[in-house]
Amino acid sequence: MAERIKKPEWLKINIGSNGRYSDTKRIVDSHRLHTICSSGRCPNISECWGRGTATFMIGGEICTRSCKFCNTLTGRPLQLDIEEPSNVAKSIALMNLKHAVITSVDRDDLPDQGAAHWAKTIKEVKRLNPGITIEVLIPDFQGKTDLVDIVIEAQPDIISHNMETVKRITPLVRSAANYATSLKVLQHVANRGVTAKSGVMVGLGETPEEIEELMADLRTAGCRIITIGQYLQPTHKHYPVKEYVTPDQFAKYKTIGLNKGFDQVESGPLVRSSYHAERHIKK
């Protein structure tokens, strides 16, 4: 077994909580909500929950896929919770959020892969929270654009779909998704006039040149926002970290991305898909 690389100083996280963190946790727990903050072991959970923000995960907590970088449970999902759209909407109201981020597990077991559940959730959030803006982080729906359209027609403000990694490494860490399909989904979103966003992890063995190629492909697809963050191995069973990318390199990626025409680039060791997502709506 290869020796694990020691985490550098810049990846040390200040773990703490405040009253807002406790309130957010209480709301999430009492409404039986699933969040990617918890299931994904996000390093920013203290900061985000302390600001009263959370990324809600719908469709249950069990994913039909088993990507080698992801800590979400995998297996046979339970039936959809018909109360989930209402519970998410009520929780957002209790948190007094002006901007909400919603993601989901993959539901390849369902005929529509959860698209109708997505639409119901978005509409219910809007009904109970007039004036709110919404970012959704969607699965690839197996590249079926008619299912993507169901989400688009519910009118979220930003639609994000993560490329996760470069073309060469995609088949090594993504269990069912593929590079071309993900680009197809993002291009369809952009062609429908919705702001398209994507997220990328680094430290899986990619080269800077491959990241630049990925950025170019995203811009060609019409993607306007990109997040770039360090991959952190959830457990010893997951894909190993090949490199801890330096803050200087993250700064270079941000400059390259802006020069390639992205409206916004979030690039840093602890950046995740929904990190400071409320900033992205401003443009």
Image (cartoon, helix red, strand yellow):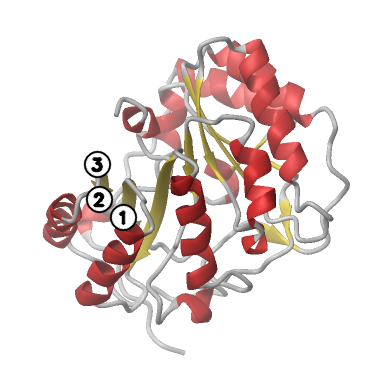
> Which amino acid type is marked by label 3?
Asp
Cβ atoms at labels 2 and 1 below 8 Å apart = yes
Describe residue 127's horizontal placement relative to residue 25 as left or right: right
Q: Residue furthest right?
A: 79
Which of the two marks, 3 or 1, is nearer to us in this view?
3
> Which amino acid type is marked by label 1?
Ile
Q: Where is residue 74 in the image (x, y as percent from the top left)?
A: 72, 63
Cβ atoms at labels 2 and 3 below 8 Å apart = no
Other-residue count near label 3 (Cα within 10 Å), few / some / many at <14 / 14–19 / ≥20:
some
Label 3 sits on a secondary structure element that is loop
Describe residue 159's horizontal placement relative to residue 226 as left or right: right
Numbered label attached to residue 8: none
Residue 186 can be seen in this image: yes
Q: How far apart are marks 3 and 1 (CA)?
A: 14 Å
Q: How far apart are marks 2 and 1 (CA)?
A: 5 Å
* In the rendered image, the vertical position of residue 228 relative to residue 166, given as above or below: above
Numbered label attached to residue 228: 1
Q: Nearer the viewer, residue 139 or 104?
A: 139
Q: Where is residue 188 in the image (x, y as percent from the top left)?
A: 51, 52
| Residue at image location 66% in from the left, 63% down from the top | 142
Q: Which residue lies furthest to the bottom in this view?
A: 1
> Which amino acid type is marked by label 2?
Ser
Other-residue count near label 1 (Cα within 10 Å), few / some / many at <14 / 14–19 / ≥20:
many
Give the mark nearer the N terminus: 3 vs 1: 1
Q: Name the residue under label 2.
A: 267
Q: How far apart are marks 2 and 3 (CA)?
A: 13 Å
Residue 57 can be seen in this image: no
